[in-house]
Amino acid sequence: MQIDDASLVPYVRSLGLLPPGRRLEVEPAGDGNINYVRRIRAEGDGSVVLKHARPTLERFPEYEAPTERLLFEHAYGEVVQEVAPEEADVLPRVLHFDAEARALVLEDLGDAPRLEEELLAGRAPEAALARIGRFLGRVHSATRARAIDLEQRFQNLGMRELHGEHIFTFPFEPNEFPIPTEVRHEARQLLEPSLRERIRELRKLYYESRQALVHADVQPANILLVNGAPKLLDAEIAHVGDPAFDVGTVLAHLHLHLARRSNDPALRRAERSLLEEYRAGGGREKDLGRAYGYAAVEMLRRTIGAARVRAVEDPSAAVAALRHAASLLGR
Ligand SMILES: Nc1ncnc2c1ncn2[C@@H]1O[C@H](COP(=O)(O)OP(=O)(O)O)[C@@H](O)[C@H]1O
Ligand SMILES: [Mg+2]
């Protein structure tokens, strides 16, 4: 079933989640990059958010992605609820799930700021990052022993690959991404053969590890801060893989800012708390070295890949990020 602007209101009405007899108003939620995400408001009383996966991406209709991605997003929440119920409040509450329609109805978290905007504004919310660290440590440690069973349930191969190629392959091959000349030039200079070899090793680990359940897209654009508490969205790439990959993604986005604010004590504290709480939640120390490798690759792809971030819009910030990433990758 395909949900569109015409069928959305009768569909949501039929679920009985909002008070009856009210006019329902629809507005986009978020920036509509990948999925069809809408807020449905009952006049005067209550609202929900509906996320619907279509075969092509909303903003990039030239890309296709399997709609099963929404089933994996839902399954991720179910597993967290089962293995780490005390951490489940980090995920938005699910009000309704329709596997056939590829639709997930979530509690409306409102217009909470994203962690990405907080970092861009020069802040580094330590408590939120600590909580994300704890969450990841718990989910990784609680799913290790069942990784083999969970792997049967998380055959999210299409999304794992789409994501993986955008991270580990496309940015490092000839491409047409609109990258400023000086940034391209800097990347070519920095990415000497030994670093390229390290990227290939990490790519292999990303695809071949089967250690624990990973969310796989813990970027700060997917973390809303609701009264300071983090809410992690968008588990559509969840798979059984390398736990260091999740930690690396969070670290990357802190280090995109540390590249230019290396002495910012708030950013350093946030990084320390993230890692301390990751260990406290049961995350393994020995995964953290690899996490910095993944962080470096994520920084590179966010600077010279298809999905560049605002933190590196300015070419001098991009060059600083590339140098910082190369030093992390080489250490
Ligand atoms: N439960 C929610 N409450 C409020 N806003 C939400 C909720 N879920 C998603 N959003 C908004 O929609 C955006 C896209 O949602 P997300 O799950 O990340 O989908 P996509 O796969 O399209 O990125 C989020 O960045 C956020 O702004
Ligand atoms: Mg998202």
Image: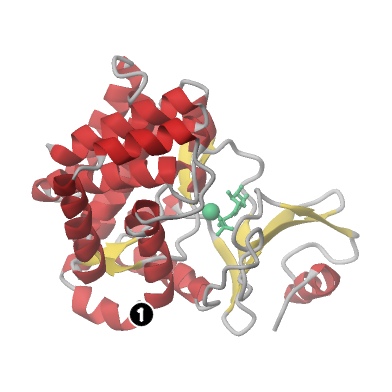
170 displayed left or right of 291:
right
Up the image or down, 31 lies above or below 83; here it is above
Q: Residue 94, how many percent across, how many down?
A: 55, 64
**Mark 1 neighbour class, 10 Å CA radius: few under 14, some 14 to 19, many 20 or more:** some
| Element type where label 1 sits in the image | loop
Name the quarter where the C terminus is drawn. Answer: top left
Question: In the image, what residue occupies the spot 23% across and 57% down?
Answer: 243
Amino acid at dot 1: Gln
Q: In this view of the protein, which residue sits in the foreground, 243 or 260? A: 260
Q: How is the image coloured?
A: secondary structure
Given residues 64 and 159, the one toward you in this image is: 64
Residue 10 image point, x, y percent: 83, 74
The N terminus sits in image quarter: bottom right
Q: Toward the viewer: 157 or 7? A: 157
**Residue positioned 43% across, 50% down in the render:** 90
Residue visible at 34% across and 81% down in the picture: 153
Side of 316 relative to 27 (left or right):
left
Residue 211 in percent (x, y) is at 18, 67
